[in-house]
Image (spheres, rainbow, N blue to C red):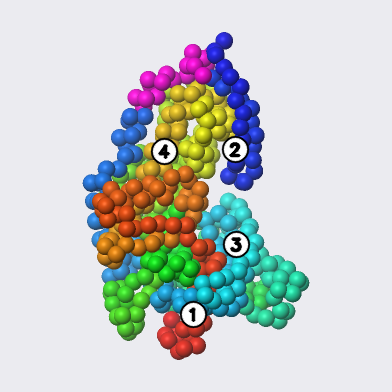
Amino acid sequence: MPASRRGSGSITLPTGQTLAFHSHTRSSEDDDLPHATKKKMADHLRKYEALFTLTPQRMRMIVEAFKESLETGLAKNEQIVPMIPTYVFGWPSGNETGDYLAVDLGGTNLRVCLVTLQGGGKFEITQSKYRLSEEQKQEDGQKLFDFCAECLKAFIDSYIDDGTIKAGTRLPLGFTFSYPCAQKSIDHGQLIRWTKGFGAPNTEGHDVVEMFRRSLEKQNVPAEIVALTCDTTGTLIASHYVNPKTRIACIFGTGCNAAYMERVGDIPKIKHLGIPDDEEMAINCEWGAFDSFEHENLPRTKYDQIIDETSNKPGEQAFEKLISGRYLGEILRLIICELIDEGVLFLGQNTYKIEIPYSFDTAFLSLMESDPTDELLMIIGIFSHFFALETTLAERQFFRALAKLVGRRAARLSACGIAAIVSKKGYLEEGCMVGADGSLYNKYPGFAERIHEGLHDIFGEKGRNVVTYHAEDGSGIGSAIVAAMTKQRKLAGRYPDL
Ligand code: BGC
C-alpha cells in the first residue's frame, strides 16, 4: 500500500459553482499505478522551460516588429494589424450625462446595460447577462442579432414595468461589438473577420450596425444605435472618464486587443477625410492579428501551431492565440496529451476525458497556480473531478510549473504589445496608465505583475513608469460615454457625417 493521506478542499468552477472535494492523496511515488518519477518530470519541465521562456532580448525584437506593424496599419488599409480609426474624437470631458443603453456582444456573454452618466466621472449601471451557446456562435448572423434584440427588448420592458424607463422613450444605444470591424463612421462597421471561435455565416463583410438595426426594427425595440465601439475603445474612454492619466486600454480575456488615442495627422490612411491633423481619434489596434499568416516574429511552439491549424481560422489572430483565455488551457492540454502519447503520464488510466479538445479550461490554470496547499489539493480536485485521473505530487508540481510557463509567456507577450504602443507614442519618460480588463487580467494570479516585470525587462528601470490597472467597464460604461460624446459632437456640428 502506498503511503497516503486524506485531503479536502473546494474549488470554484468556471461556471461560478463551488465544488467541495475529499481526496485520497498520494505522498510518495511508489504507487500502485505506474506514475512518472520526480526526476523524469523535472527533465520534461526543462524542455518546456526552453520552449516557453522569452528572454528580454527576444522581447525587444518583438517590440520592434510590433511597432512596425502598428505604423503600417496606420498608413494603409487592409494590413495585418488593421489599426482601425474608430471615429471617437478625443477624450471625454468627464461631464457627459444622460441615460444610455449598451449592448455588449463579447466572446462569451451577451450583456445588456442601462447606464446613467451623472457627470464628474460618476455613473450608475444596471445590467443583465446571457451566456451564448456554442451553437449561437455558429448560427446565421442575422439570427444572432435577433437574439440580441430580443434580450434588449425584454430588458427594456422590465425597466418600463418598474418605472425606471418612461414608456414611449427611445433611448440612445451604444453597441459594443468586440470583433474587428472596418469603420467609415461611428455608426458603421463592416466585420473584417470573426475571432474567438465565432463563425456565424453571412456576417463577415457585412455592416453589423445595419444588421442589428434590422433586428431592432423587426421587434419594435425602442432604441437607436448611435455608436459602434469595440470593448477596448470603450475601456479606453471609460477609464479616462474616471482616471484622466489613462493613455492605453487593453483587454486580456477570451480575446486580446488594445486601443489608444492617436493624432489624426499620424493616421495617413484617413488623410482624405480632411480632419485637421491636431484632432485626436481613438485607434482600435486589433493587435490580436499581429504576425498572422507570416508567423515571422512570434515564438510559436508546435502546440501553438496545432491550435492554429485546428482552429476555425487558421493563420489568423496569431498573437491572440498565444495569449488569450480562449487558448491557454488548450496549450497546456496539448502538452499533457503529448506526454500521455509518449507514455510518460497516466499509464494505466483512462485518459479519454482530457483528450477532448478545449476540455481544459484556462480557469484551471489560474486555480492550479493559486493552489495554496502543500499537497496541491486543488490540482487533485481538477484532475480527479473533471478528468477522472489520479495524480502524484510530482506530477501536480509539474502541472503547476507548466501552467506558470504558459501564463508567464502570455503576460510577457502582452507586455511586448503595450511596449510597442508606449514606444511609438513616446510615453516612456513621462509614464502612463494602462487600463486593462478581461478575465485573464482580472482573475489570473500574477498576470499584472508579470506584465510589469516584462515591461521592466524591455525598458529597464523606466519600464516602471508604465502601470496597468483594472479598468472601468468599457463595454457598458465606455459604450455609453462614447454614445454621449457622439451626441454632443453631432449637436455641435463637428463632423456630423462621421
Ligand atoms: C477581437 C477584438 C476584441 C478582443 C477582446 C479580439 O478577438 O478581435 O475586437 O477587442 O478580442 O475582446
Reading the image, the residue beneath label 1 is 486
Real-space CA distance between mark 1 and mark 4, rounded to the nearest whole angstrom: 43 Å
Reading the image, the residue beneath label 4 is 404
- The quarter in which the C terminus is drawn is bottom left
Reading the image, the residue beneath label 2 is 11
Mark 4 or mark 3: name the one nearer the start of the chain.
Answer: 3
Q: Is residue 482 above or below residue 410?
A: below
Q: Which span is picked out in magenta?
A: 27-44
Q: Residue at x 42, y 69 (%)?
A: 244
Q: Which mark is residue 111?
A: 3
Nearer to me, 480 or 269: 480
Q: Is residue 226 left or right of residue 453?
A: right
Mark 2 or mark 4: name the one nearer the start of the chain.
Answer: 2
Mark 2 or mark 3: name the one nearer the start of the chain.
Answer: 2
Query: Which amino acid, by three-letter code, is at mark 3?
Result: Arg
Provide the secondary structure element on which disc 2 rests: strand
